[in-house]
Structure formats: C-alpha cells, structure tokens
Image (cartoon, rainbow, N blue to C red):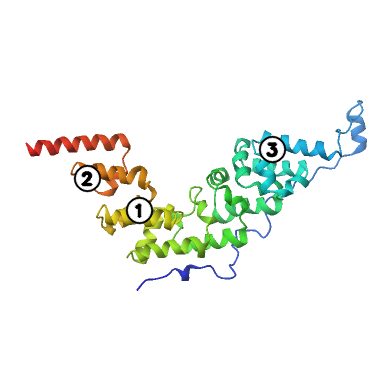
C-alpha cells in the first residue's frame, strides 16, 4: 500500500514559536534630539544650505535611471516588470538598498537580485524584507552571516510571504525530518520557497511510486535535499527511464546513491555509461559518477589494461 504525505501538511493555524517575536526585531532608529542652544555654541559658522531639490519629473526620473545603472540593473526590464518604479521616489529605492546592505548583502549582488525580481525595487523594507530576515534568524535559526549565503543561493526568498509560504513549508520539512543534524541551513533554505502541495508532495509521491517505502524516501531526501528541487518531467522521468532501460540498473542502487539525480543526463551519465559499455566494463553508479573527468579517464585506462592482461 502506498503511503501518501498528506499527514505532513501544516495545520490551518500553526502556533507561533515562543522564540519568534510578534513584531520584527528590526526597528527604525530614532534620531536623537538636539538642543538649539548647544548648537549655537557648537560652531560660529552658519549652517550649511539645504540640498538642492527639484520638482522636475524628467530630472527626477533620470536620477532614478542613473541610480539603477549604478546598481547594474537593466532599467528597461525594471520598467516593464515593475510599472510602480515610475512613481516611486529615489529615497524609497535607496531604502531597499540600505535594508539589504544592513543584512550583509554586497552592493555588487543587487544587479542580479533586482533583475530577477524588479518588484523588490519598490517594496517597503519594514513590511516585505525585514520580516523575512527575522524569520530566517529567529525561526530557521540561521546565523547572521548565513543570511547573505541564503539570499545569494535563492533571491526568491525575498519575495515570499512569511505566514503564507515560508513558515508552513518549514513546518512540513521539519515534520519530514529536517531537524537536528539535518536541519535547514543556508544551503537548503531554497526548499522554503517551494509549495508543499504543488511541489514537495508530488516529488515524494513520485519516488514512492517507483517502489520505495516511506522511510526509504525520507532517508533519500535527507541525504540529498536537492531531490526536492528537481523537476519530475525534466529530471526524474528521463533519468529513471535511462537507468532502468539502458543501464539495466537496480532501484536499490538509487536508494543507496540518490545523488544520481543531481548529475547531468546528457553531460555525464550517458557519456560515461557508454564509454564503460564500449570497453566491456561495469561499475556501480556511484563509482561511475562521483569521480572527476580526469580520474574517470585514468580509471578507465587502468581497467582496460587489466582487462588486456587477463586476455593474454
């Protein structure tokens, strides 16, 4: 009987972790009050003139375009995907930059992030961004310096709603076994952006449909979390088909080496397998795939020499 994963779905209302504050940790600092009398004695020079401002919409728009280019963001793409950019002030744009910088994200990385998700340019950091950072720190348990690694790996985290997306998926993954030594890290936070019903459960059910037991699938996923990120149609099915039909493989080898699905079918699996077949050699899939190209070729030559000696 095939076990489905519906029992791992999050409840409609998930109790909030006592470690997760009801309000974000990040608060806008208040400016210290100044005493005008002290200011008079502080300097005899007149105060500097206020910065020059303009209300010319054309000049203001050009300033925003120049700003985008300084971040290496494609202005045309940004305008097409985020029409709100036209009416957003330059100060708002810079507040997003300041927010990301405060979390250790380098300015050199903004171009890629904003090109992928131009809607971030006009978001409200206190409503949209700081809650995500707070969740990664307080709920997931990442260290501050791991925040940058997580965002570099998966900028999509920045556009996910904490309550509707991130927290329910974290709950599901922890029920699945991503705790303790297998807990979510900066390398696996990308799993949090996946839909439980639409993405994670179908992949688990597909693996069980191959004949694996529930416990076996869980163990495979914990050993190789990337299994939850691969496409069923573009990854699983063609690789399983080649493994069973061309390689005459045993499913028990996939259970032992689930990393098989992380290798390119056309770039590594097929070429190496055909080389082995052409030379009359047969090795386990982990020995065929884990080594570098140089080591694989060296082992292939060594195996051919040994085979030649036996024939003599």
- For mark 1, does the 10 Å Cα neighbourhood hold few (<14), some (14 to 19), or many (20 or more) residues? many
Which quadrant would residue 45 be assigned to in this image?
top right
Comparing 270 with 89, the one in front is 270
- Identify the mark nearer the N-term, 2 or 1: 1
Q: Residues within 10 Å of mark 2 (few under 14, many from 20)?
A: few
Query: Residue 100 occupies which quadrant of the picture?
Result: top right
Question: What kind of element bears circle 2?
Answer: helix
Q: Residue furthest left?
A: 312
Q: Quadrant of the C terminus?
A: top left
The answer to whether residue 79 is left or right of residue 236 is: right
Residue 14: percent from left, percent from top: 58, 67
Please indicate whether residue 252 sits to the left or right of residue 97 in the image: left
Q: State the separation of the CA atoms marked 2 and 3.
A: 54 Å
The percent position of residue 9, horizontal first and vertical second, equals 51, 68
Quick check: marks 2 and 3 in contact, CB under 8 Å? no
Circle 2 residue: 277
Q: Helix, strand or loop at disc 3?
A: helix
Q: Earlier in the sequence, mark 1 or mark 3?
A: 3
For the residues labelled 2 and 1, the Cα–Cα distance comes to 18 Å
**Which residue corresponds to the image point at 31% horizontal and 53% vertical from the top-left?**
242
Helix, strand or loop status at disc 1: helix
Q: In the depicted view, which residue is nearer to us: 41 or 218?
A: 218
Q: CA distance from mark 1 to mark 3?
A: 42 Å
The residue where tag 3 is placed is 68
User: Which sits earlier in the primary sequence, circle 2 or circle 3?
Assistant: 3
Q: Residue at x 66, y 51 (%)?
A: 130
**Residue 276 is drawn in which quadrant?**
top left
Residue 107's x, y, as percent? 63, 36
Q: Circle 1 is placed at which residue position?
A: 239
Q: Nearer the viewer, residue 77 or 223?
A: 77
Residue, far bottom: 1
Which labelled disc corresponds to residue 72?
A: none
């Amino acid at each position: 009987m095939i076990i489905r994963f519906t029992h791992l779905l999050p409840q409609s209302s998930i109790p909030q972790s006592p470690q997760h504050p009801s309000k974000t940790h990040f608060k806008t600092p208040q400016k210290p009050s100044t005493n005008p009398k002290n200011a008079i004695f502080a300097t005899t020079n007149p105060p500097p003139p206020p910065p020059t401002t303009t209300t010319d919409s054309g000049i203001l728009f050009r300033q925003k375009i120049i700003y985008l280019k300084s971040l290496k963001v494609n202005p045309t793409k940004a305008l097409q995907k985020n029409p709100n950019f036209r009416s957003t002030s330059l100060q708002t744009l810079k507040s997003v930059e300041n927010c990301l910088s405060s979390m250790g994200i380098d300015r050199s990385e903004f171009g890629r992030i904003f090109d992928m998700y131009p809607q971030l340019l006009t978001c409200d950091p206190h409503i949209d961004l700081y809650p995500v950072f707070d969740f990664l720190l307080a709920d997931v348990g990442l260290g501050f310096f791991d925040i940058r690694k997580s965002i570099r790996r998966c900028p999509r985290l920045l556009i996910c709603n904490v309550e509707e997306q991130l927290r329910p998926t974290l709950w599901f993954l922890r029920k699945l076994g991503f705790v303790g030594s297998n807990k979510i890290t900066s390398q696996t936070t990308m799993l949090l952006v996946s839909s439980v019903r639409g993405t994670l459960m179908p992949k688990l059910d597909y693996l069980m449909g191959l004949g694996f037991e529930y416990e076996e699938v869980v163990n495979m996923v914990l050993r190789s979390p990337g299994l939850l990120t691969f496409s069923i149609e573009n990854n699983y099915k063609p690789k399983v088909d080649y493994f069973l039909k061309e390689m005459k493989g045993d499913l028990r080898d996939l259970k032992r080496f689930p990393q098989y699905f992380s290798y390119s079918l056309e770039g590594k699996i097929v070429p190496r397998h055909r080389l082995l077949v052409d030379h009359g050699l047969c090795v386990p899939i982990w020995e065929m795939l884990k080594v570098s190209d140089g080591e694989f070729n060296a082992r292939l030559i060594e195996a051919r020499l040994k085979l030649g000696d036996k024939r003599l």
